[in-house]
Amino acid sequence: MERNRRITLARRPEGLPADDDFATDEVDIPELDEGEALMRTTHLSIDPTVRTWISEARSYFPPVEIGEVVRSPGAGVIVATRCDAYEVGDLVTSLPGWQEYSVVRDDVFTTPAPPGVDAVDLLGVLGQNGMAAHIGLLDVGSASPGDTVVVSAAAGATGSVAAQIAKLTGCRVVGIAGSDEKCDWLVDGLGLDAAINHRDEGFGDALRAATPDRIDVYFDNVGGWMLDAVLRRLAMHARVVLCGAISVYNDPRKPPGPSNYLELITQRARMEGFNTFDHWGRFAEITTELAGWVADGRLVGRETFVHGLERAPEALRMLFEGGNTGKLLVEVG
Amino acid sequence: MERNRRITLARRPEGLPADDDFATDEVDIPELDEGEALMRTTHLSIDPTVRTWISEARSYFPPVEIGEVVRSPGAGVIVATRCDAYEVGDLVTSLPGWQEYSVVRDDVFTTPAPPGVDAVDLLGVLGQNGMAAHIGLLDVGSASPGDTVVVSAAAGATGSVAAQIAKLTGCRVVGIAGSDEKCDWLVDGLGLDAAINHRDEGFGDALRAATPDRIDVYFDNVGGWMLDAVLRRLAMHARVVLCGAISVYNDPRKPPGPSNYLELITQRARMEGFNTFDHWGRFAEITTELAGWVADGRLVGRETFVHGLERAPEALRMLFEGGNTGKLLVEVG
């Protein structure tokens, strides 16, 4: 009988996760109880949040313990079912972790795919990334027509959707990314008004030039020095949307905070965090809107694939080294 | 003829302002143009914001230039008038600066006193401090009955009003102050649920013990390590109200930012700055509410007086050294 290959946490990574921080094993495929179904994972979503889950840091989930399967979002197909909510062949997303098979229930962390949607979109544009972009930009950030919106990691999975939604909203949109190639894609491919390569010298000058009316909304995926620099450029009543902080997740020291946070007083501005899980009830409504834009060609997803479950640790590193454009996915099996 | 004694900025202070950073001079009392009135200052309000105005830092006002009178709120009496809005004998607050006489106009920065209110209340409980406390706690912080509210510099002019309004709102209120005497006043005098002396060891433990349900609203006047410690104790959907950051205004280095700011993501919380000047249109309404509480004895002001214009620099230092309880005022002339 087929077995379940898994990647478990061998020890807590210090800094960038190394291959030795993980272990591979094989166990029996779980037996199903009443109300459960078995999902075979086809794609793992490689997200910065996984790095926080395997650290000791307090988060919205308890840390992954040593020896446990690495927690991760993913999509897959139902291959056996004792649950009314699923039929064999259904495509679902859940939190399968870094393994081939997992048990799903009809609970909030499992989402059946709307008709005509594939696993890739379900994990990216129409999944957590699309949700985070939509909720972060429009609900938390209150982006409105005419606003200047700056997005960091704008060529990433969430950033690229946030930047496109901002354009659809009628904002002036400036993306920040880590290579000229990514910047070219942002401007020529996605239609952003400007893009800044943060590895170039003179970031502050470039930011100033790209935001003549200052910044109304900063959609932040990066944190660190970039957040600090953007704080100095806020417009009155600006909103800093904290979606993530990829620059600090690997930092074994306590990273410094944004020393320019008092600009929030000067500019009567706010900085706010959010979590898409809090908005689960709106998933269907938001997905429908996003899917409409995708169908129209007004919202474009782009993916970088890594092949093979065993390469999930490598893919996680790639994410922090800027190796992906758009959504980073591991194709399993 | 009487002359106008003034204190001007001689050089930009580094760290705690020194007497040598200021100069004293005497000039003619200004002639009035049509639409102007002359105010003789009776009280100067000694506020942390004055420290930021005499630095080079970007603020909501341009920096005070070398040789200019130190900008400062104050209250006084109209002694001559060519303006319909004022009669001789009227009590007003404005931004007279550190000088005996100043010209006022019928503009937004001048507020006539409601009947029965004296200069002390007009500068404190019913003035900028009361406004900042009311707007910060209720509008920005959305404090509601049952919330746990923590106030830093709770024995200060704004903090003591914010803490009392939080009690009147039905919150559990914890004050942070710099001496046992102040803490005793907060609990025994103002009825707070708990007070923490931040100079004691074990601040984190004391904070945890005083906030069993974590912290819904943090009204921050202090910044620095205290803000960082409180961020670790936020409740879900908490609001951090940035009123000021007295701990950093004298720091000649760029002070570190709050490294625990990512708790804002974990707790889906926000940190927001504000400025009472934006709410000038509500001044009368809020003053009426505050004055009602003062008349009932439910809101108590307390003052520390320093006598003599020439001691304004000393008073400003006192503020940063925790020498005052409640409102710190210089009595002029």
Image (tube, coloured by chain):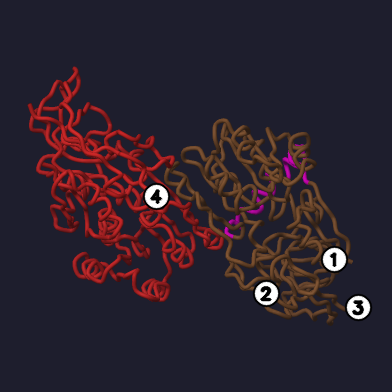
Chain colours: A red, B brown
Using the rendered image of the protein, determine whether residue B75 is visible from the camera's viewpoint: no
**N-term mark: 2 or 3:** 3
What's the residue type where badge 2 is placed?
A: Val
Give the label, 1 or 3, closer to the camera.
1
To which quarter of the image does residue B162 belong? Answer: top right
| Magenta run includes residue B21 | no
Would you place residue B321 above or below residue B197 in this image?
Answer: below
**Which chain letter goes with mark 1?**
B
Secondary structure mostly seen in the magenta stretch: helix
Q: Using the rendered image, report if marks 4 and 1 lie on a common chain.
A: no
What's the residue type where badge 1 is placed?
A: Arg
Using the rendered image of the protein, determine whether residue B218 is visible from the camera's viewpoint: yes
Residue occupied by mark 4: A140
Residue occupied by mark 3: B2
Q: CA distance from mark 4 to mark 1?
A: 47 Å
Total marks shown come to 4
Q: CA distance from mark 2 to mark 1?
A: 19 Å
**Which chain letter goes with mark 3?**
B
Q: CA distance from mark 2 to mark 3?
A: 26 Å
**In x, y percent, where is residue B290?**
70, 45
Q: Which residues are magenta?
A: B278-301
Pointers 4 and 3 in contact (C-beta within 8 Å): no
Q: Indicate the secondary structure of the residue bearing disc 4.
A: helix
**Which chain letter goes with mark 2?**
B
Give the label, 4 or 1, closer to the camera.
1
Q: Indicate the secondary structure of the residue bearing disc 2.
A: loop
Residue lying farthest to the right in this orientation: B1
Residue occupied by mark 2: B64
Q: Using the rendered image, report if marks 2 and 1 lie on a common chain.
A: yes
Would you place residue B291 above or below residue B147 in this image?
Answer: below
Residue occupied by mark 1: B311
Would you place residue B272 above or below residue A215 in this image?
Answer: above
